[in-house]
Image (cartoon, coloured by chain):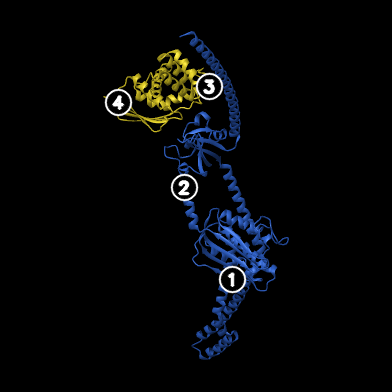
Chain colours: A blue, B yellow
Amino acid sequence: MDSATLHKRLERETKARLTAERLLEDKSRALFDANENLRRTTQTLEHQSKELNAILDNTLAGIALIDDAGLIRRINQALLTLLSYTDDEIVGTVARTMLLGESSNRPTPAVRKFNGSVVQTLDVQGRRRNGAEFPMSLTIVPLAIDSRPHTVWICRDQTAELEAQKNRARLEQELAQAQKLESLGVMASGIAHEINTPVQYVADNVKFLHTAAHDLKRAFGAYQSVCNSIGDPDEASALAVTAQSIVDDADIHFVLDELPEALNHAIDGLEQITKIVGAVKTFAHPGASEKTEADINNLLRDTITVSRNEWKYVAELETNLQANLPPVEGFPQELSQVFLNLIVNAAQAIEEGRSDNGRIVVITRLIESGVQIEVSDNGCGMKSDIKSKIFDPFFTTKGVGKGTGQGLSLCYNIITHHHGGKISVETQDGHGARFFVNLPTAASTRSSRHDTNAGM
Amino acid sequence: MKGVIFTNFLKMVDETFSPEVTEEIIERANLPSGGAYTTVGAYDHAEILALVVALSELTSADSSALVRAFGKYLFGALGAAHPEYISDINSSFDLLKEVQDHIHVEVRKLYPDAELPKIECVSRDDDLTVHYQSERPFASVAEGLIEGCIDHFKDNVTVERQDFSDDGRHAVFVLKRVA
């Protein structure tokens, strides 16, 4: 290599070395910056992780992250406490160990039902470490981590809530019973009046029967004397005259003609009393704690009987009850209370509207969604602002002492919350009101319950 | 383009021709970098084309043949610098199949901004088809690299080149084992 070439090469190599050194410095600086960024990012992530852990561990709901193999990847303190496990004991185990009856390798029914794409909340039985079971609400939230399907399980112990629900149901039942007894108290004088009318004519007819029995006894005795003196024609003849006189005095022919009718009247009266007393007894019954099959038409007939004195002075009550209506599953006493409230409200609306031709119509019919009860009246109706509030608790348009504002609110609660039905009203100010109560049939209630259970 | 290509090219000219030829082509090519290459730097690929043209003019050698020869030389140089990538491999077919998913991944660790060609291999019986696609017209460098690879493993393999573009950016090499 000649010196000129050597010189050029040296110059080039020197320049290249300087370039390399500059690049090295740039790289070192970039590396330092990257390290700094990494350190700051790590600090931020650690801080965020601590915050998230604090939130996760201090939230009241139990939360677990489940991977695509069904294993618990992460679990918060609330769920550890709920299940009585430690983190080491449960992380990495199959998630179904949290659920009762899932110790085998069978897929968890709740998880099997979970279709993997939408958030679902299921009622399941949770299982603690010692095997104790408890009612648990399980919300499964699907998500993807690194493109792999995972789920977040949000678990809540339902023990206290179910207990509260039971207490609430008991209180509601007690309230309904109290209101029923209040209604009976309000209607007591009317019912007494209703019973008094048949009692009066039962008593009149029984008095007639009593007199008739006395007269018949006398006539029978006289004729018996005639029969006994048949051997002595003169005495027999005299006794026969006396007997005929007794028969004429007592008007025995009239008595004999009237006897069957008097007995029929007495029987009718007693049957009416029996009906009223039966209806009152049915109405006042505290009711079953479990739902039973109820015949809506029978409940309406009893309610109409019990409330007769509330409407008979202001309205005619017409019924159009569809025959062979399928039964409804529910609490018959609560439903009777609803019907009573609607009928009494109708009567009061007619009274307030001062209509001379008051008319209440009670209709039952089978519709697509179940059984529909319609109670309509031609009373005063309601303005739209009132209509929107009538199902609110304590709302009343009645004067002091006439309504507590619990009636329609109670109806709403009974129909919607206790029976899964609907209650609505169509009304115009001055043009009456038409209440509709829709209830599912017992068959459809059973069917939907079966579907729910099968899903679990 | 990474500086290692340039430094090796100049090294090849040094060894094959002479240092004087190397300096001469640098002067003739009138390069923006002045030919002061360092392996860790990155330079315009047009400079290597200019160097090849200058070398071809100076030596009257076919430029394609020069580029292919450089490819062969480059394989030897890279293999010597990074023996870890070839020491556990027994044939040219196996190494070529590693290029896209292994060797290029390693290159990116050192040079994240490297613009590497896309190399796809399809093997069938005794054949291996290597698809080459690049933003740069260096199919001949690739051909030389493949030949260098075959020579390294002493495989009895023929190479047939099919160009899919006129400018050397897209070509297919069909490698066949010879019994």
Image disc number at residue B177: 4
Q: Is residue B91 above or below residue A190?
A: above
Q: Secondary structure at mark 2?
A: helix
Determine whether label 3 and label 1 are within 8 Å by CB.
no
Q: Is residue A452 left or right of residue A274?
A: left
CA distance separating discs 3 and 4: 44 Å
Residue A6 in percent (x, y) is at 49, 10
Q: N-terminal of the two: label 3 or label 4?
A: 3
User: Do dots 4 and 1 share one subunit?
Assistant: no
Q: Residues within 10 Å of mark 4 (few under 14, many from 20)?
A: some
Kindly indicate the quadrant of the structure image that contains residue B9.
top left
Q: Chain of mark 2?
A: A
Image disc number at residue A119: none
Q: From the image, tell me which residue sits under label 1.
A: A318
CA distance separating discs 4 and 1: 104 Å
Kind of residue sitting beneath label 3:
Pro
Q: Residues within 10 Å of mark 2 (few under 14, many from 20)?
A: few
Kindly indicate the quadrant of the structure image that contains residue A380.
bottom right
Residue A122 in percent (x, y) is at 51, 44
Q: Chain of mark 3?
A: B
The mark closer to the camera, 4 or 1, is 4
Q: Chain of mark 4?
A: B
Kind of residue sitting beneath label 4:
Arg
Determine whether label 2 and label 3 are within 8 Å by CB.
no
Q: Is residue A172 left or right of residue B67?
A: right
Q: From the image, tell me which residue sits under label 2.
A: A455
Q: From the image, tell me which residue sits under label 3.
A: B32
